[in-house]
Amino acid sequence: MEISARHLDKITVFDISGDIDLASSPELRKALLREIRVLRRPRVVVNLRAVRYLDSSGVASLIEALKASREIGSRFVLFGLNTTLREVFHISKLTTFFEICDNEEQAVAP
Amino acid sequence: MRRRDLLLKMELRSNPQSLCVVRGALAQLTERLGFPEPECRAVVLALDEALTNVIRHAYAGRPERPIEVSFRRIRAPWRGESREALEIVLVDKGRRVDRTKLRGRSLEDVRPGGLGLHFIRENMDAVEFRRIASRNRLRLVKFLRVPRPPRDS
């Protein structure tokens, strides 16, 4: 997994690529929670377009980030879910729990 | 009597870095067996979650512990007829798994953790756990939905 961050005004956009699994999800969790809990960014957006694989540990990291953002009243937005990721969200019954956008334009819109 | 053809046997260590190797091998194997693409992904996810559970719970995150995974093509009864299926058996020497935790949790309770078992049960047709001679043995079966002629190779 590769992870990088861009800062657009008060929004942080994480671009993630590769596989999110037991080996890589701790790094994802750490990066997301730092941005939300420590830096207290008003909106954190996660670009998942280049993610090939997501397992339950990756989903757990996203749930934890979402809960952290709700605790401080910020927004946590996902976009770029491919078929594989949509299947995982579907069987997790999490599709309505997360704020999911089709593209970055929507995800960073005011 | 069930027919069982051994397709592949892997001896792994309980290192999360090995998961991507197993996923790659199983993706090719399921495709070769004739599973549709969504079912290939489903089986790969189920095995990945099963291995993750072994690493995290049976071995409590300790690396370099042995995990054996075997893949067999079998014929077995399913919904009143004999069907071809992929059987995956995982064996580890970790601590006994708490059977009450094998039930997973309600998805209404949205929180990190506990999703792995749900993914396994949702994606496989049979999930059987046994403790034999100080070893955990997990058997996963996925049936081919559409019967196809047997391949020679």
Image (tube, grey):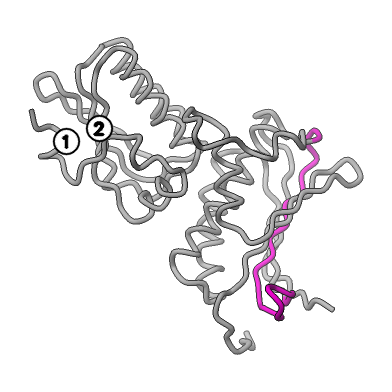
Q: Chain under label 2?
A: A
Question: Disc 2 designates what residue?
Answer: A77
Inspect the image, locate mark 2, and give the three-letter code of the amino acid beneath it: Val
Task: Compare marks 1 and 2 and give the one earlier in the sequence.
Answer: 2
Q: Nearer the viewer, residue B79 or B63?
A: B79
Magenta segment includes A102: no
Q: Main secondary structure of the magenta part?
A: strand
Report which quarter residue B115 is drawn in.
Answer: top right
SS under mark 1: helix
Q: Is residue A68 above or below residue B80?
A: above
Rendered location of residue A58, percent (x, y): 44, 36
Report which quarter residue B18 is drawn in.
Answer: top right
Magenta segment includes B79: yes
Whether residue B128 sits left or right of residue A87 in the image: it is right
Q: Residues within 10 Å of mark 2 (few under 14, many from 20)?
A: many
Rendered location of residue B124, percent (x, y): 61, 58
Determine which of the numbered discs, if any, sits on residue A36 in the image. none
Whether residue A41 sits left or right of residue A61 in the image: it is left
Q: Chain under label 1?
A: A
SS under mark 2: strand
Identify the magenta region. Answer: B75-96
